[in-house]
Image (tube, rainbow, N blue to C red):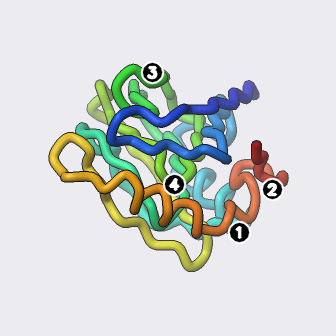
Amino acid sequence: MRREVLWLEEAGKVPNNPGLPVIVVSDAFEAGSPEAAELMFSSHGWPPAWRNGIYTYPHFHTTAHEALAIARGEVTVLLGGEGGARRHLSAGDAVVLPAGVSHQKLQGSEDLLVVGAYPPGQSPDEVRPDQSKVDIDAARAAIEKLPDPPCNPMNGEIYPRR
């Protein structure tokens, strides 16, 4: 298991998160098993919310933190907006995206299956900096009001803060 912590700065119409990092963990759960991903999230208090893919357009949430587990296949994502971090994720990998962090699929295998989860009581909005007129001040304010994640949904540890 390899863990990477990414601190992303604001990028144009993408606020990212000034206080919370993106956490990427390789081999976080049993590859090929969406049930193992759901168990990992739920055992740390993040209810699994969906099974699907990752949008091909950049977007971020101001009303929820999001955890993604690659259950099957592989995907290359762009995190943090233009000029951000590109990461290749494979089955068994997981990533936590604090509110404000832009994410999009650049490429993915045909068998890609992702499990998504949010902290209890949080429901995501969808802000598209490529199409929306983004009020960056309102986005920052909403993100600042959102409680920190209750823990890292991959291992239950306290979520790091700047």
User: Which of 24 and 43 lies nearest the eye of the viewer?
Assistant: 24
User: Type of residue at label 4?
Assistant: Ala
User: Type of residue at label 3?
Assistant: Arg
Q: Furthest residue to the right?
A: 157
The residue at which mark 3 appears reads as 86
Q: Residues within 10 Å of mark 3 (few under 14, many from 20)?
A: some
User: Which of 95 and 15 lies nearest the eye of the viewer?
Assistant: 15
The residue at which mark 1 appears reads as 45
User: Which of 78 and 108 lies nearest the eye of the viewer?
Assistant: 78
Q: Residues within 10 Å of mark 1 (few under 14, many from 20)?
A: some
Q: Residues within 10 Å of mark 2 (few under 14, many from 20)?
A: some
Q: Earlier in the sequence, mark 1 or mark 2?
A: 1
Q: Residues within 10 Å of mark 4 (few under 14, many from 20)?
A: many
Distance between the alpha carbons at the discs numbered 3 and 4: 18 Å
Q: Is residue 155 above or below residue 94?
A: below
Q: Position of residue 27 (x, y in %)?
A: 67, 31
The residue at which mark 2 appears reads as 156
Distance between the alpha carbons at the discs numbered 3 and 2: 26 Å
